[in-house]
Amino acid sequence: MQETIVEKDCKVSAEDFYDTLLISSAQEAEEAVGYEINVKDIKEGYHYRRDTEKHGEEIVTYKRLLPGREYAIKVSRGTKNIQMRFRLEKKDENSCHVVLSQTIMTNKKPDWFSTMVMKKRLKDRLNLIEKGTKDRLAQESGS
């Protein structure tokens, strides 16, 4: 088992960050299944299959969804399972603290280099979600 944890203070509300995660999830699910998926369709236990060029078939399962507080999924690839969990802590109306943990269930022992690469990827993911949230909010407000 290999667990990687990164944290970030984001300049968006916990609710808006969570909404961006769900909107993005609905879009990914829609691409995978080939028909329209609404954010309301995504609930704990919901799952879908997707094919990726790099990893082949994956099953994405929503494990825990607490609006504005927690979002957790599991991605199954053959014998390898990856769990991602976002924990959101409201700081004030326009900011939050995000803790992203990724656990890879594998028999391989993690090395220093792969751990550092994974941390960088997870930090980049948090930055992209924060930017995507800001862009979405700006577009919704018309500015």
Image (cartoon, helix red, strand yellow):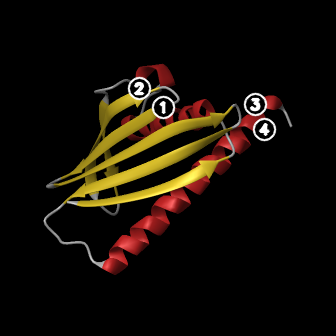
x 47%, y 26%: residue = 36
The residue tagged 2 is 42
Q: Which mark is residue 140?
A: 3
Residue 52: x %, y % from top left: 34, 55
Task: Check the image and report above or below for 137 versus 38.
Answer: below
Mark closest to the chain's N terminus, 1 or 4: 1
Mark closest to the chain's N terminus, 2 or 1: 2
Label 4 crowd (10 A; few <14 / some 14-19 / many >=20) = few
Q: CA distance from mark 3 to mark 4?
A: 5 Å
The residue tagged 4 is 138
Q: Secondary structure at mark 4?
A: helix
Q: Secondary structure at mark 1?
A: loop
Q: Which mark is residue 69?
A: 1
Q: Are marks 2 and 3 in contact (CB under 8 Å)?
A: no
Q: Judge by depth and name the residue closer to the eye, 50 or 143.
A: 143
Q: In the rendered structure, which amino acid carries the disc numbered 3?
A: Glu
Q: How many marks?
A: 4
